[in-house]
Amino acid sequence: MTDVSSNRSQEKCKQPAILGIWRLGEVIHESSTTQLLLAQPADAVGSPRWDYVIKRARSGADHLEGSRQILQSIAAASCASHPNLIAMLDASSTSNQPYMVMPRLEGEPMQSHLESPSSKPLPVALWLVRQTAQALDSLHTTGWVHGDVKPANSIVGSRGHVTLVDLGFASRIHTLPNHHFRGTPEYAAPEALAGSLAAIPAMDIFSLGRVLWQWITRTEQVSQMMLEPVADLVQLMVSKDPDERPTASGVVQLLLQLEIETLGRHIGPANTTSVTANRLAA
């Protein structure tokens, strides 16, 4: 443990306080390959505001892999733009320290909501997943596959706005797989794990289907009539045959329809009864 702490301390000492036109702040997240740091414009000396986040490769043995992920993020974010997809505000891909600048997001990973002891209404769960599907539709339309769709990569704001983040494992559609699987096995499509197919949008749909299934198990109890159509959609999304999975655009439309239907059934009779009872009690 002492060696690890020492290495990290040495690494932080080596890192420049300024990167491009940005002043670097504290590290808010790091993996074995990359770091996320708070940032502000370099000329904002003394400002208490840290409204931006820089993603860069960590130094050390995994620097090349971290740099590769940054460059992939830049390439994908340069093509796709959507309110539910992380925005790229600035980037550098020419130096030996590539980086990408993003807005600082206020919220929590979707994973935190799934792990919360309190369940959510089914229409809310569908709404959150639909927003992720909208981000994927934008990516797929511009020729990219996200490659690592999971609850930890969707940030949910205080008002429920979802932002899909982390494009480090993104690939252009039809890119042939290499020898090294990149992603999260728990959510990866079987063909992605096997490395038997080039990158295709259906791989992201499978992953999102796993996310939707998790939400079904964490929502408030509803009638079978409300749950069956959602379960049918999940079954389509996680089909072993990629050709049987719907497109991201199709998933968005189906989820929107299910949101409207389940919302009506969720709040209609129950709320009417409650209001009537309250009036009678008054």
Image (tube, rainbow, N blue to C red):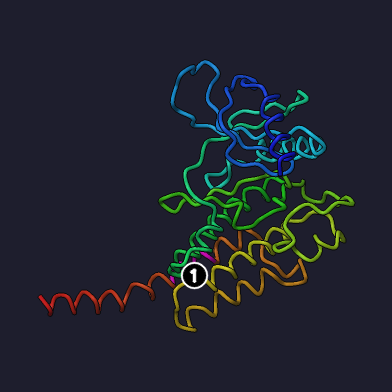
Q: Is residue 253 magenta?
A: no
The residue at the point 61 percent across, 51 percent down is 153
Q: Is residue 9 above or below residue 185?
A: above
Extreme front residue here? 2
The residue at the point 44 percent across, 72 percent down is 261
Q: Which residue is mark 1?
A: 258
Quadrant occupied by the N terminus: top right
| Secondary structure character of the magenta stretch overall | helix
Extreme bottom residue here? 224
From the viewer's side, name the closer residue of 187 and 139.
187
Query: Dot 1: within a 10 Å radius of its alpha carbon, few (fewer than 14), some, or many (20 or more) residues?
Result: many
Residue 214 placed where, x, y %? Answer: 58, 68
The three-letter amino acid code for the residue at tag 1 is Leu
Image quadrant where residue 99 sits: top right
**Left or right of residue 159: residue 12:** right
The residue at the point 25 percent across, 76 percent down is 272
Residue 126 placed where, x, y %? Answer: 50, 65
Residue 249 placed where, x, y %? Answer: 61, 58
Extreme right residue here? 179
Residue 105 placed where, x, y %? Answer: 50, 41
**Left or right of residue 22: residue 204:** right
From the viewer's side, name the closer residue of 90 and 28.
28
**Span of residues in magenta:** 255-261
The residue at the point 56 percent across, 58 percent down is 111
Quadrant occupied by the C terminus: bottom left
Q: Is residue 271 above or below residue 163?
A: below
Q: Is residue 258 magenta?
A: yes
Circle 1 SS class: helix
